[in-house]
């Protein structure tokens, strides 16, 4: 499938094989050695790059790699994914969290859907978000002082609420992820440690490279998380120029699973004696992890979730 997609995209762009090789060479140091012979062999299916490299090649030509992921040979979700879900979501749900949700627990067979986080600037969801962050993520309360509705409308963030069926009053959780210019993220000017400058967010456009920072998320059950992870991977596949994902975690199980996907720990906070996330011989209360989206999207769990979401 890579061979067909590559050839189709090349022709749509009006490139010869030589011109495509030249464009790839200019797009990334990684592809400087690619020549006409390599392009020809790929298009004829004689050879093929790894899945992660194929995604990095395709994202130099297009921002949408969903068709490539959809047609990769069938792969099931890993046992590590199921283990992670069981470890995290078998735990009792705190009553204070349910107060944020404002609803009773929803059965596992409940139909799950999603909508934009906010339907208006004065959406009542804002009050629930403030209650949740006051109780569980006070360090992120400043986030709620931003004009999140404007951020949402300007595509400066990917933010959703998860719903039980078609009733928008049955809330199963939320996710808020901010977009930053990739160069800004690499220079470190958008944050000091875990403190993010929310005003540095960037508006999504198809011709720039971005990093996505998941700053807040809550999921009532493993089914809701699975739905979110499928939605996230599809959004990243649709916007392949979002080239990095950052996520903060406090759970050892979450960190272990993310590392199995290819995430790397780039920052730690508050060394602890008991519990925490183990990094070498030490344990920490919180960690920041990062991954290149080509690696994330090429993992079998992502491929399985994208296929399920698109069918």
Image (spheres, rainbow, N blue to C red):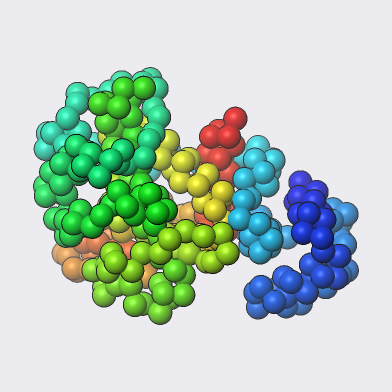
Residue drawn at the location 65% of the way across and 40% of the way down = 70
| In front of the other: 62 or 106 | 62
> Looking at the picture, how far across and down is residue 309, in whole percent?
53, 34
Residue 177 in view, yes or no = no
Residue drawn at the location 65% of the way across and 74% of the way down = 28
Quadrant of res 227: top left
Quadrant of res 88: top left
Residue 265 vertical position relative to residue 98 in the rendered view, above or below: below
Does 208 sit left or right of 226 as displayed?
right
* Quadrant in the picture for the C terminus: top right
> Looking at the picture, how far across and down is residue 246, in whole percent?
39, 61
Does 228 sit left or right of 295 as displayed?
left
| In front of the other: 112 or 15 | 15
Quadrant of res 34: bottom right
| In front of the other: 124 or 43 | 124
Residue 241 vertical position relative to residue 34 in the rendered view, above or below: above
Residue drawn at the location 65% of the way across and 78% of the way down = 29
Residue 266 in view, yes or no = yes
> Looking at the picture, how far across and down is residue 25, in whole percent?
72, 75
Residue 210 vertical position relative to residue 135 in the rendered view, above or below: below
Residue 115 vertical position relative to residue 248 in the rendered view, above or below: above
> Looking at the picture, how far across and down is residue 218, in whole percent?
27, 43
Residue drawn at the location 27% of the way across and 31% of the way down = 171
């Amino acid at each position: 499938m890579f061979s067909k997609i590559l050839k189709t995209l090349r022709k749509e762009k009006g490139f010869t094989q030589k011109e495509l090789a030249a464009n790839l060479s200019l797009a990334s140091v990684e592809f400087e050695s690619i020549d006409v012979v390599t392009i020809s062999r790929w298009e004829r299916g004689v050879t093929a790059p790894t899945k992660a490299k194929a995604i990095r090649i395709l994202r130099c030509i297009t921002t949408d790699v969903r068709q490539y992921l959809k047609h990769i040979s069938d792969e099931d979700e890993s046992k590590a994914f199921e283990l992670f879900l069981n470890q995290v979501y078998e735990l009792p749900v705190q009553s204070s969290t349910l107060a944020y949700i404002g609803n009773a627990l929803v059965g596992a067979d409940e139909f799950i859907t999603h909508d934009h986080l906010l339907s208006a600037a004065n959406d009542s969801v804002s009050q629930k978000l403030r209650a949740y962050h006051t109780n569980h993520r006070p360090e992120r309360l400043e986030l709620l002082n931003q004009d999140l509705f404007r951020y949402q409308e300007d595509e400066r963030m990917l933010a959703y609420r998860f719903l039980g069926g078609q009733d928008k009053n049955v809330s199963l959780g939320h996710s808020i992820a901010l977009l930053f210019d990739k160069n800004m993220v690499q220079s470190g000017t958008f944050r000091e440690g875990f403190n993010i400058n929310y005003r540095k967010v960037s508006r999504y456009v198809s011709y720039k490279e971005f990093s996505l920072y998941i700053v807040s998320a809550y999921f009532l059950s493993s089914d809701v998380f699975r739905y979110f992870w499928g939605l996230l991977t599809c959004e990243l596949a649709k916007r392949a120029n979002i080239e990095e994902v950052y996520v903060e975690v406090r759970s050892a199980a979450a960190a272990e699973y993310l590392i199995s996907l290819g995430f790397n720990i780039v920052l730690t906070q508050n060394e602890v004696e008991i519990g925490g996330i183990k990094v070498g011989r030490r344990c920490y209360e919180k960690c920041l992890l990062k991954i290149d989206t080509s690696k994330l999207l090429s993992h079998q769990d992502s491929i399985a979730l994208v296929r399920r979401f698109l069918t």
